[in-house]
Image (cartoon, coloured by chain):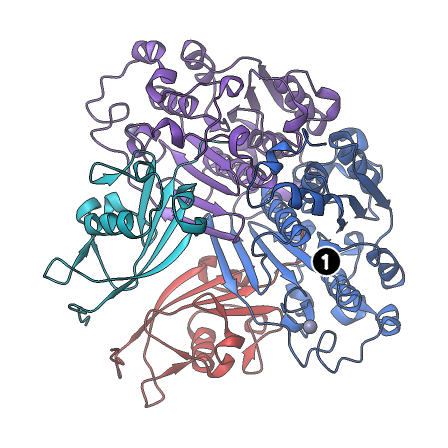
Chain colours: A cyan, B purple, C blue, D red
């Protein structure tokens, strides 16, 4: 029993880690955001979210976040603690209150 | 022996059988630095049968803030010798093997072949690809940890259907994303936490006790004291190394230029200064 | 000095100011066992100004599977001496104080008073109540860790409005619930993980960097590799020790019979065999 | 927009740790259970859950789990990763899919 909030804002939590937070204002890791679904059917998919993040949150070196229309190599994307590859990748559909994590893989030791 | 490990033998989920499996297992730790310090010490203490340590570097004073296996007296001496001596001091009953080389495609197969389990405790991207490829070719589980700044990551590759490093990262990141501890710093105890967890996962895999972090990744953020354990993709059927139709052979491995592939050096010494 | 800690100085969130605060801080580690081993090593390595270690016991062979600070050569000798020597070997530039006593109500105030932060790395219930009471009376933050079997727990008491041990546990559990490592066993690396996390929390409190685990508790399950960080109650206004109307004085503390209160001995040696 | 599933079963996840799992069959830590709310108004409160756990899950030494009508000293109770003292304690009302953790505090080191 779930009502899709058509044309009303979707509340998402976005987290950036592994150094990706350095691309954002004040290097803030956690961002609570309201997204207006803008593709007509009230949906937000990952592809759209990436574009939104690039326009609204990334302050510098966008090439360190995106490559083509996806994230750059070395970045893991997690939707509600699950690898986005298991949820549909760029086409994964987001739901109200989802938590999306973008994390750059570390190599140090 | 029984008295030394009595606190393990008392554990219902571990017990005599767990301790016996540990004593018959051989584990290779690649890197005797921030991660390798707790890994080697805890694996030695707990009684693995054979502990191998590989590292080509010497101990430097600025390692000591986090590499607790090395004493000041060993500054300027081989890390492997220093680490092996420390392991023998806490447990003379295990077999400790020293490999004072940088692990390379030319020597990796020969060394890794002798062990049941490999622990990646290294500090650079080309070596991480190389160790993963080598573990796939020789079918060894790989306990992989990383730490930088105030964050750490941990997973078990190529075990129980879990991915290899190339399944997750088929293409290397841009050079500017390859920061190291020498570029960006690391809070000393962060690799300590990750290294202890690596030792734990190695023990679990060696003894077949509990659920190892295969197909899951632990993400540690020291500043906020938050830990996420996330589900990651399984082994990819189209992976160029572990996939069904992989044509990657031991010959290919020995000829593969990991530094060129990642545009990043295997040795920390020649690392350029990078900022993300 | 600058070179030794260069990897800390490079950290934007830590830097010179964090390292300076560490070098001016004094931290007391109570217990040089499974938890105390990584706590003392990492605090020594990272450069705290003064590190105190309290423990009345001697090193036994069956400690060595988890107490990685002790070498075989020290079996039969004082744990405090063994631990302090190990700390000095990795960092001769810090001040290490040895207290070869069991911490008791009669000596605790005098010792704890000298330190900014206390780390509870002990192994028994009456000592845990005693250390918490002492920290409340002297207004010291308490980094408390525990490990048993394949589980661990960690929190920061009496800091930033967080509870004291008595706020959470006003009444002691039944005697049959007071299992120890000597009764039930412990997988050696479990206190390793918790001890590293205790060292991290001590560093965060000492340097005022990040969000310490005050008002939160970390629950670690090694078997399933699951970690929960949960929100716990704040300091209780009606707590008999830290509450608004507490009448508990230093005099009361020195006379309080913690063994009788918990029906449990402070020393492991006299512990009966218990099964939950 | 949340419909209370009146008189239908409530699905809860119960977890036991710190040694409490030894009181349960096969020492199983995680239990997915369906509870029939039986107090007429379709609610399940913690007090009722404790009684249910005692009757249905605890196989031995119930005094190591309960004392009077609450948990014994030394046991922490967490509702969705939050200390039950912050949620109403014995009167805390449970909701569909809640996760309740019972954990005995450890003293070893
Ligand atoms: Zn693969
Ligand atoms: Zn209190």
Q: Does residue A42 show up?
A: yes
The chain holding disc 1 is C
Q: Which residue is mark 1?
A: C124
Q: Residues within 10 Å of mark 1 (few under 14, many from 20)?
A: many
Task: Give how far across and how far down residue D99 sits, in percent.
Answer: 40, 67
Most foreground residue, C69 or B25: C69
Horizontal side of C202 relative to D69 (left or right) equals: right
Q: How many marks?
A: 1
Horizontal side of C60 relative to B275 (left or right) equals: right
Task: Give how far across and how far down residue A33 sits, in percent.
Answer: 32, 61
* Quadrant of the image occupied by residue D68: bottom right
Task: Give how far across and how far down residue B217 sits, in percent.
Answer: 40, 43
Q: Quadrant of ligand 2?
A: bottom right
The residue that appears at 67% across and 40% down in the rendered structure is: C42
Task: Give how far across and how far down residue C187 sits, in percent.
Answer: 59, 44
Horizontal side of B126 relative to B271 (left or right) equals: left
The residue that appears at 70% across and 29% down in the rendered structure is: B90
Q: Residue furthest bottom?
A: D40
Most foreground residue, C73 or A41: A41
Q: Residue furthest left?
A: A40
The residue that appears at 75% across and 32% down in the rendered structure is: C91
**Image quadrant where one finds the N terminus of chain A:** bottom left
Most foreground residue, C37 or A16: A16
Q: Is residue C265 above or below residue C67?
A: below
Asked whether mark 1 and ligand 2 are closer than 8 Å, the reply comes as no
Q: Does residue B92 show up?
A: no
Q: Is residue D14 above or below residue B234?
A: below
* Quadrant of the image occupied by residue B192: top right
Determine whether the residue tagged by mark 1 lies in a helix, strand or loop: loop
């Amino acid at each position: 029993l779930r009502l899709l909030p058509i044309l009303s804002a979707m509340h998402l939590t976005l987290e950036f880690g592994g150094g990706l937070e350095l691309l954002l204002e004040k290097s803030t890791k956690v961002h609570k955001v309201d997204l207006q679904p803008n593709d007509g059917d009230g949906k937000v998919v990952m592809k759209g979210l990436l574009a939104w993040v690039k326009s609204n949150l990334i302050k510098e070196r966008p090439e360190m976040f995106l490559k083509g229309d996806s994230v750059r190599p070395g970045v893991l994307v997690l939707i509600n603690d699950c690898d986005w590859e298991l949820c549909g990748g760029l086409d994964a559909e987001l739901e109200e209150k989802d938590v999306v994590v973008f994390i750059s893989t570390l190599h140090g030791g | 022996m029984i008295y030394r490990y009595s606190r393990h033998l008392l554990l219902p989920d571990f017990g005599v059988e767990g301790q016996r499996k540990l004593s018959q297992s051989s584990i290779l730790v690649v890197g005797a630095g921030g991660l390798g310090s707790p890994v080697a010490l805890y694996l030695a203490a707990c009684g693995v049968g054979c502990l191998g340590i590989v590292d080509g570097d010497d101990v430097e004073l600025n390692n000591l803030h986090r590499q607790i296996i090395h004493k000041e007296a060993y500054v300027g001496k081989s890390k492997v010798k220093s680490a092996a001596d420390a392991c023998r001091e806490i447990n003379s009953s295990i077999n400790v093997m020293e490999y004072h080389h940088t692990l390379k495609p030319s020597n990796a197969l020969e060394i890794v072949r002798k062990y049941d389990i490999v622990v990646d405790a290294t500090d650079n991207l080309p070596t991480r690809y190389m160790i993963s490829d080598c573990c796939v070719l020789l079918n060894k589980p790989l306990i992989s940890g990383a730490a930088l700044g105030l964050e750490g990551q941990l997973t078990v590759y190529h075990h129980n259907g879990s991915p290899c490093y190339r399944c997750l990262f088929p293409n290397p990141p841009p050079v500017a994303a390859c920061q190291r501890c020498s570029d960006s710093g690391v809070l000393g105890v962060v690799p300590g936490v990750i290294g202890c967890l690596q030792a734990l996962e190695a023990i679990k895999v060696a003894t077949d006790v509990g659920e190892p972090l295969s197909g899951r990744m632990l993400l540690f953020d020291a500043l906020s004291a938050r830990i996420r354990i996330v589900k990651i993709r399984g082994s990819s059927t189209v992976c160029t190394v572990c996939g069904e139709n992989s044509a990657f052979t031991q010959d290919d491995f020995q000829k593969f230029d990991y530094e060129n592939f990642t545009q990043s050096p295997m040795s920390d010494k020649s690392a350029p200064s990078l900022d993300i």
